[in-house]
Amino acid sequence: MPDHRPSARTTAVSLGRDLMALDRALYEAVTVTRTPTLDSALRRLSTAADHSKLSFAAAALLALRPGRSRRAAVVGVAAIGVASATANLLGKKLVRRPRPHRAVDSPFPGRHVPMPESASFPSGHTASAVAFAAAVSPVLPAATLPLGLLAVAVGYSRIHTGVHYPGDVIAGAVLGTGAAATVLAVAGARSGASRK
């Protein structure tokens, strides 16, 4: 009797299509939702996060105080470097997902930021913001909530302003978390080795 169950590969391809369709549907839901108060604020936030300017500013403030605060700034900046390099030099070049389509007759053009020329997947802004927050938080727990909220806001702003799909942002967050974990592990190993 023949086996009519779908193969694992067929199931994976089908699941991938479904996830892509859901990703596009979520993006479209954001693009047609009227939020005039949020539009300008999120556009400004998204622009301010270009080149990790917000995270570097936070790191500069943290570095003003010696001890744990300065150590948090160092590991945070290192995590940005790892996340940014991984997202831009590896992720975007391997996946090459096109940016979302923004119609010329978009109902809310005032919310848009300029469309980057790089690939869409993963979100480098999100990867760097999450990496900074996730690296700083264990070293300086008082910074967890503000930096975590900022990272979430930066990630959402990239969808809201029309330059990323939600899946790009989720992938960026995962990548940023991994970058932070890597930097913290290396920093912990060096710290342990220096004590011996």
Image (spheres, rainbow, N blue to C red):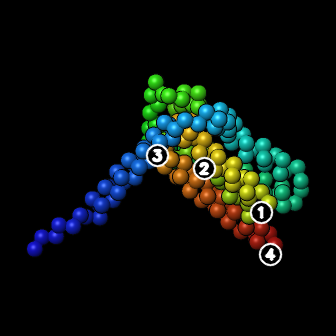
Give the Cα separation between the discs numbered 3 and 1: 33 Å
Task: Tally the numbered discs.
Answer: 4
Q: Residue at x 65, y 35 (%)?
A: 37
Q: Residue at x 30, y 61 (%)?
A: 11
Q: Position of residue 104 (x, y in %)?
A: 46, 24
Of residues 187 and 63, which is closer to you in this image? 63
Please give the residue where the numbered disc 2 appears in the rendered image.
127
Q: What quarter of the picture does the N terminus occupy?
A: bottom left
Going from N to C along the chain, the mark reached first, 2 or 1, is 2
Going from N to C along the chain, the mark reached first, 3 or 1, is 3
Going from N to C along the chain, the mark reached first, 2 or 4, is 2
Q: Are marks 2 and 1 in contact (CB under 8 Å)?
A: no
Q: Residue at x 69, y 54 (%)?
A: 148
* Numbered disc in front, either 4 or 3: 3
With 173 as the anchor, is 31 left or right in this view?
Answer: left
Name of the residue lying farthest toward the top: 104
* Numbered disc in front, either 4 or 1: 1
Q: Are marks 2 and 4 in contact (CB under 8 Å)?
A: no
Q: Residues within 10 Å of mark 2 (few under 14, many from 20)?
A: many
* Three-letter amino acid code of the residue under disc 2: Ala
Please give the residue where the numbered disc 3 appears in the rendered image.
26
* Three-letter amino acid code of the residue under disc 4: Lys
Q: Secondary structure at mark 3?
A: helix
